Amino acid sequence: MAEETETAEEAGSPEATVASKTNTAAPAVQAEGMAALGALSETSAAPSETSAPAEPKIDKQGRAYATGRRKNAIARVWIKRGTGQISINGRDITTYFARPVLQMVLQQPFETAERTGEFDVIATVVGGGLSGQAGAVRHGISRALTNFEPGLRPALKAGGFMTRDPRVVERKKYGKAKARRSFQFSKR
């Protein structure tokens, strides 16, 4: 094989030149590369093993804060240990979200985390309609729960409560009645 590469080098073929360079330099380069990879894997493995669990983010009043968003609604949510009372914009949940479906949406993170009736929620929400506001408060409750108890994050993430729903209303286009709806077609 070595004789073939020497004769090929004499012939001046580029493949043979590359092959001969890689054969002579390959063991040294490969050894350096493997050593670098080994050092990299050791450094990347060490922080993950020694990293402490996330610290709870609780203020002086014993509350955890988070912001939730859905459609055009933005909710600021504070949770603290309590009896399970939920206040939205200074009003009770049953008066602000009169529909039982919306009240159920707000309870979902607590049921998933098995913390029903353990936290009081104070939220201020602006923008959007009632459905978007309920989704924003739910998102905020989920994030605030993970700030209060970081160990709840896997359960809430598996339930899909930590992800901000990216769906928003599509913009209206010119030449159309709405985003996609065309004006009525008139043949004549």
Image (cartoon, rainbow, N blue to C red):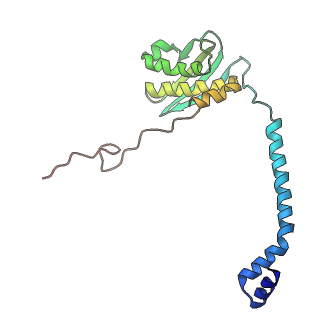
* In this view, 21 is above or below 160: below
Residue 157's spot in the image, x, y percent?
61, 31
Give the residue at the far top of this rendering. Answer: 83
Query: Toward which corner of the image does residue 14 lie, by quadrant?
Result: bottom right
* In this view, 134 is above or below 18: above
Q: Tag count in the figure?
A: 0
Depth check, front residue: 87 or 47:
47
Residue 162's spot in the image, x, y percent?
59, 31
* Quarter occupied by the N terminus: bottom right
Residue in view at x 46 percent, y 13 percent: 95
Query: Toward which corner of the image does residue 81 lie, by quadrant?
Result: top right
On the rendered structure, is 124 left or right of 9? left
Give the residue at the far left of this rendering. Answer: 188
Residue 60's spot in the image, x, y percent?
74, 19
Residue 41's spot in the image, x, y percent?
81, 49
Query: Toward which corner of the image does residue 172 lie, by quadrant?
Result: top left
Residue in view at x 58 percent, y 22 percent: 112
On the rendered structure, is 78 left or right of 169? right
Residue in view at x 74 percent, y 88 percent: 12
Depth check, front residue: 38 or 183:
38
* In this view, 10 is above or below 173: below
Depth check, front residue: 32 or 11:
11
Residue in view at x 20 percent, y 48 percent: 185
* In this view, 38 is above or below 69: below
